[in-house]
Image (cartoon, grey):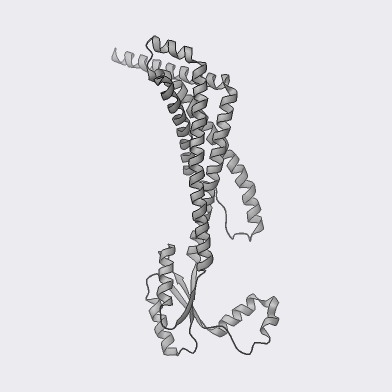
Amino acid sequence: FNRGELKHQRSWKNSMMMRFFKRAIDDIFQNRFLNIVTIITISLAILIAGAFILFFVNTSEILNSWQRGLRIVAYLKPDIQNGDLTNVEHTIQSLDGVNTLQFISKKEALDRLKAQMKHQSSLFENLSENPLPDSFEIRMTASTGSWQKIESLAAQIESLALIEEVEYGRRWIGRFVRMISLFRLTGYAMGALFFMATVFIVANTIRLVIYSRREEVEIMRLVGATDSFIKLPFYIVGLIQGGLGAFIGLVMLFISFFFISANIEEGFSPGLFRLQFLSPATMGGILLSSMLIGWLGCYISLKQFLKA
């Protein structure tokens, strides 16, 4: 008897869920214009938010690759004796974060420069002496990953008495990091703005749908229907709106990414860097967030309507 009763309850619940889904689909088709506007709004919000996320993902990957290949060049003061040179080399090698150290003489540095500027060889014809200093080229360990650690290591090397100057591209790296921070703040602000606007639009769409069915809702309440029973079809509408909006937004984002990445990679050296799309986990998070927006807009609208 208990098994039969449980089976009957499951069958009844499944039947009710199918009715709720059917009712939600009917509401979407009956109010096509409102729902299309809502879905397009959600998809545009997802497109813009996804573009910012995509920008952060790829710029972070570029920064990480630069960090892995970053070198510190320490220029030595002129006329250093061999004994002092050995002491400086041992001191730098003992610093935390230093992996390898290579001494580059001024002659070797000039030869490298001539090789790099072989089409402008006339610039070197009238040199009376070598203007380049001796230097150490320092590669860092993999654990030295943050910019703070890199700057700290560079400052320690520069503080040595026989070091004239340290160079590792701090100026342009700093500008690039500041630019990314500015884009990140802009992304947060626009994300919050689109979140509130989308919730507002979804709430008003659901409110109009409820208004068109207000007599039916009132009759359901009079015959004893619970608020959960009344709300569920509308919640399903909100979830469908959010899910469809996220799907369309991600498809548009992928199409845009495909064409943009193809043009960017063709304009640079092959293999220099490769742009990557959002991971499945990130896309899943965007989909769930979009469905949450649809549910939240529906929740706000229903709360106000049923309270009234």
The residue at 51%/26% (across/down) is 204
In the rendered picture of this protein, how many numbered marks are placed on residues? 0
Please tell me which residue lies in front, 64 or 182: 182
**On screen, residue 78 above or below 97:** below
121 lies left or right of 146: right
140 lies left or right of 127: left
The residue at 66%/76% (across/down) is 117
Quadrant of the image for the C terminus? top left
**On screen, residue 27 above or below 130:** above
In the image, farthest residue toward the front:
308
304 lies left or right of 51: left
Please tell me which residue lies in front, 16 or 224: 224
Q: Quadrant of residue 96?
A: bottom left
Q: Quadrant of residue 230?
A: top left
**On screen, residue 244 above or below 63:** above
Image position, residue 188 (x, y; %): 48, 46
Image position, residue 202 (x, y; %): 51, 29
**On screen, residue 241 above or below 228:** below
Image position, residue 10 (x, y; %): 37, 18
Note whether residue 86 is visible.
yes
Q: Quadrant of residue 26?
A: top right
The residue at 64%/59% (across/down) is 268
Image position, residue 194 (x, y; %): 51, 39
Note whether residue 283 is visible.
no
The residue at 46%/30% (across/down) is 297
